[in-house]
Amino acid sequence: MSQEPADHRPDPQPDTGTPPALTGPPAGGPAHGTRRDRRRARRTDRRRARRALPGWRRAIPTWRMLLTGLAGLLLLGIAAFVTLYLIVPVPDANAHAVAQNNIYYYADGTELARTGAVNRSDVTLDQIPADTQHAVVSAEDRTFYRNKGVDLKGMVRAGWNTVTGQGTQGGSTITQQYVKNYYLTQDQTLSRKVKELFISLKVDQQQSKDQILAGYLNTSYFGRNAYGIQSAANAYFGTDVSRLTTAQSAYLAALLQAPSAYDVKNATPANRTRAVARWNYVLDGMVSLGFLDPATRAATSFPEPVDPKPAVGLAGQTGYLVDIADTYLAGTGTVDAATLKAGGWRITTSFDKAKQDAFAAAVQQELTDELDPRARPGTDTDVRVAGASVETATGRIVAAYGGPDYARQPFNDALRQDNQIGSTFKPLELAAAIEGEATTQDGRRITTETVYDGTSGRDVVGGPTPYDPPNEDDIDYGPVSLRLAMVKSVNSVYAQEGVDAGLPEVRDTAVRLGIPADVPGMDPANTSMTLGTVTPSAIDLAGVYAALANHGQALSPWSVLKLEHTGYSDIPRLPEHEPTTALDRGTADAVTGVLRDVISGRGTGAAALALGRPAAGKTGTTDANLAAWFAGYTPELATTVSLFRENPKTHAKESLAGTAGLTRINGGTFPTEIWTSYMSDALEGSRVQQFDLHPTQGNTQPSPTATPGTGGTTIPGTRPAGTPTAAASPTPTPAPTGNPAGSPTPPPGPGPTPQPSPVVTPSRSAPGRGTPSPAPTPPGAAGPTPAGALPPSPPPPKP
């Protein structure tokens, strides 16, 4: 009987629905083949079964394959980790551990300033109070005493929060930050992060936690050019580190997250709020970690730091300009404050030296020389000026005035955001109304020629809160156009017009033009917002007016042209300067046309006629005479000037009344005169440019017959302030039946109702200084004046 071939397989049996009987060796009998043969047979069976599967199913790996692959990857990862751990050494301290100078240049390459002497004094850990150590651990790394130099969970959590939009968060431990500060650089590269990881693991093994914490505290940057906890204690509290209190320690720990932004002596109101919140976070963490008992925490109050001390070598205007450039770099995220202060940077600023010198000279000649602190110590002291000048087409800051001398006053007034801007806000309300095609309370579309009731102290209708602002000197203007109301800065008119435009729309317009959204005073829930309770900086407001000059195209003011560093291969890119459309051109040009009339013989900006060029602008004076402004522009250059007084100890605002021996200081006096003097020098020798205006329909463009350079215009449909109102004087647009509050038509009557002619007392009494508004022509003196027509322009004053 012949044997079957070895590869012969029996014919498959028909499927009967009954599982085949299990086969195997006879019970109690020996197994067929060796153990190796059985394993081989099982593998063969598995491969045969997998080949029998459909193609798509074979593409899915089995669990055995997955486990094998993962095990291989794990082994490779472990091998790579061990290899990198062995080959990455702990280096010597890098060059950035010893700071270099930063060199700043004017736009033309002339050297502006050098900074960089490292303000750092190392101390041992036993000189640092335990509360200070614990506060830093609470702020920066609450797992510090438990982790091995890195916190993978924290890194994953920080990355997840960043990816999911919950805010950019740091996942670095104190050890990692110390390694970055002392051994590596601030480069945001993958190779640096990998080195930081492995060096941190090694440092944690080679140094004690006390050594690491001491190194971190001695190398960290706290702001105010202070490196290390000892210098920070002196810079912020004028004390030795060993005498720091718990509250002071928590504040210094809070500074580590944002050193410049959280300096409450220079911070914006929004940043001060964030700094206090961070301080509370540190103290609460100390309680949760067991470093501080709840009763002591509850009794701890926020510590006020001392005023900043001047930096060496930054006297005069230099320090203010350096501060503006540094703030711009940090604020745009180009270079953080700690990296910048580490030194080695070459920074070419946007400032024009000639224009900067002209700004300082204008303040000296027009204001400082007029003050006599010895004769008038109660009014001529603590007078301060803020200013900025911006190219309208580019947003480039060419000059700024932050104070008289950075060595004596290390507060940069050009950047501060705590002075209300008063009536310089009115053009933004007018722009919002024109842009949004808003209507008055009685349904008339708002244009520059729309007539409103200029009665002083009348109630604003439709506002979110009651408001009845008086006009300056409590003058009643009667029915008056928005154009003339801007020329005369009539409060009662623009309070109502702002409400008619819609306070949320006014706010949105202001933000688009460049007012920061988070500054105080821009609250649509408060009707007083209409008269300029908002508090942007002088630089912010210069950018806003530059956008008006640039036909509604807004650019954020900027102050750095070029950035270089000898030790960096990948220099951070500076932001692009692309304009955004804040207003339609017709709207912006309509507002400019009105602001040209402000600089006329009858306007509050009459002193600016001395410039002798086409210009537009607006004065502003705040309640209690706490601040006075002038913001204006020619086609190529926008400049703002603010005047205020501040107590140097309490930082409380003081009234300007009595300054230079004058009863009241308005925006049309010192601020306008400083503006005019500066602009005259800044534009000297340049071609006189004309405004190219194309206002939207219904918004009258200044007449070509106006006095050259004055912006004066005859406006139909309105009347001069204080002249009699004829009973039948028509309004530009028919009003509906009735007399809705907000924009009334003149009352009917048998004849003219005379009103007293206002005589505005000049704010400047010094001979030859200032230009008072002339009294209106008495009725009948020179024939009837057309309703709403401005009286003829007087000849411009001599420069």
Image (cartoon, rainbow, N blue to C red):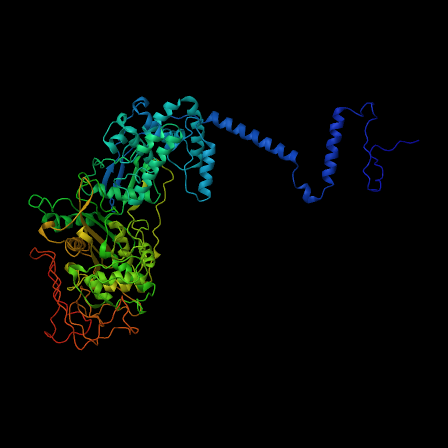
Do we see residue 392 in this rendering? Answer: no
Report the residue that reaches farthest toward the front: 295
Q: Is residue 47 left or right of residue 548?
A: right
Instruction: Please tell me which residue lies in front, 169 or 114.
Output: 169
Quarter of the image containing the C terminus?
bottom left
Q: Is residue 39 left or right of residue 781?
A: right
Instruction: Please tell me which residue lies in front, 428 or 70.
Output: 428
Look at 54% across and 27% down and name the residue there: 79
Quarter of the image containing the N terminus?
top right
Instruction: Please tell me which residue lies in front, 317 or 378.
Output: 378
Say which quarter of the image contains residue 435. Answer: bottom left
**Spot occupied by residue 184 in the image (x, y as percentages of width and height):** 38, 31
**Spot occupied by residue 254 in the image (x, y as percentages of width and height):** 33, 35
**Spot occupied by residue 613 in the image (x, y as percentages of width and height):** 18, 61
**Spot occupied by residue 337 in the image (x, y as percentages of width and height):** 32, 38
Say which quarter of the image contains residue 506. Answer: bottom left
Relative vertical location of residue 201 with respect to residue 743 in this rendering, above or below: above
Instruction: Please tell me which residue lies in front, 138 or 64.
Output: 138
